[in-house]
Amino acid sequence: MTRIALVLAVLLALGLLAGCAGGGGGSDGGSIRFTVTFPPLPSAGGSTRYIPPALMSLGIDVLDPDTEEAKVPRVIVNRPSPEGGTVSVSIPDVHTGDTLLVVKGYDQEDCQGQLICQASTTCTVNLNETAQVPMTMATTVVRVEVSGPAALIRGQIAALTPSGFDIDNSLVVDATFTWTTSNAGVVALGGAGVPPGSTLQPITAAGVGTATLTATAVGTAITGSLDIRVFPPPDRVDVQPTERTINQGLSFVISADCYAGETLLPDVPITFTAGTPGIVEIAPLTDNTARVTATGEGNTVITASQEFSSATGTCAVTVTATGGIDVGIGSR
């Protein structure tokens, strides 16, 4: 989640006491005053709020908004104690005019370690004027996870879900990501079926092999990745059982596995259909299983098919009147 700082968590007083040299000389600069309130560390009894309790230091950059060049050297503010506390900082000799203020928080002193929160705003520094500018401290991504299928069939389209977490292991809901693939000939970025504006990343299995898909949180070097193996389309569908004689009113579970050569293909969705209506009802259970219920006397063939090739498998079903037999025959 994104944590919002109280108005007083980072407060700036701008353009205060510009200062003039005696004898008519003058300065075109103002000053900036910061008041930074550090929350207690977790071990000191604090709780997660506003800015992360793990904050150990802040780097304050005063920049030209057009060139992003520093107007003054970076100012570093370190945590005064584990219990937290308030630190006031004055930055003198800041040229008047439009100013970009960038504040970055780190989990170690002297702006070392992991960037864990940041804020930025623009303001105008004027001579002999004071203005208060509240800043919003937003937690940054320190860990990225990528979830999605570890195996695909060539030609299959899927979507990956990136998740960014902050230093408190909370989800950063407004995190955005860029994507790369280690082998676009195996897994390519892009595909249909993902709504515009979604954080999901569509992918297309373009060829047989293995590729690594990597998500990078925008504004950071933090990445997460997922290895995906792409298999060839099935050339065989094995159905269990291959034959079944069953009493009317009873049911059994049918399953199907797909193979490319001797390689079992994982997670291939199967569609089961009955050739003769009124004999059985089929209710899907998982991607490759279904419950078959005998509803009427007679014979039918259930066909197991998949979308990636013409390979199919079958199960011959005979439904007898109540009091008959229940026999299943498998292929192995």
Image: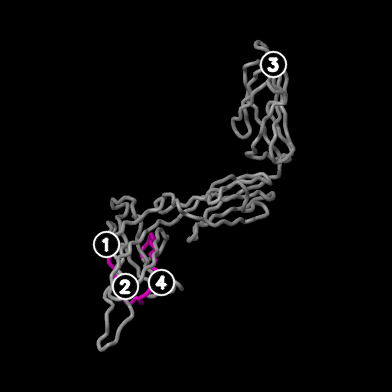
Residue topped by disc 4: 63
Residue topped by disc 2: 91
Regarding mark 3 in the picture, which secondary structure is present there? loop
Query: Real-space Cα distance between discs 2 and 1?
Result: 16 Å
- Residue range in magenta is 85-109
- The quarter of the picture where residue 214 lies is bottom right
Near mark 3 (Cα within 10 A), the count class, few <14, some 14-19 or many ≥20, is: some
Near mark 4 (Cα within 10 A), the count class, few <14, some 14-19 or many ≥20, is: many
Q: Is residue 107 magenta?
A: yes
Residue topped by disc 1: 86
Rendered image: mark on residue 104: none
- Kindly identify the residue that appears in the image at 47 percent across and 52 percent down: 164
Tell me which amino acid carries mark 1.
Thr
Instruction: From the image, give the main secondary structure of the stretch colored magenta.
Output: strand
Q: Give left or right: position of 228 versus 53.
A: right
Rendered image: mark on residue 297: 3
Q: Quadrant of the C terminus?
A: top right
Tell me which amino acid carries mark 2.
Ile
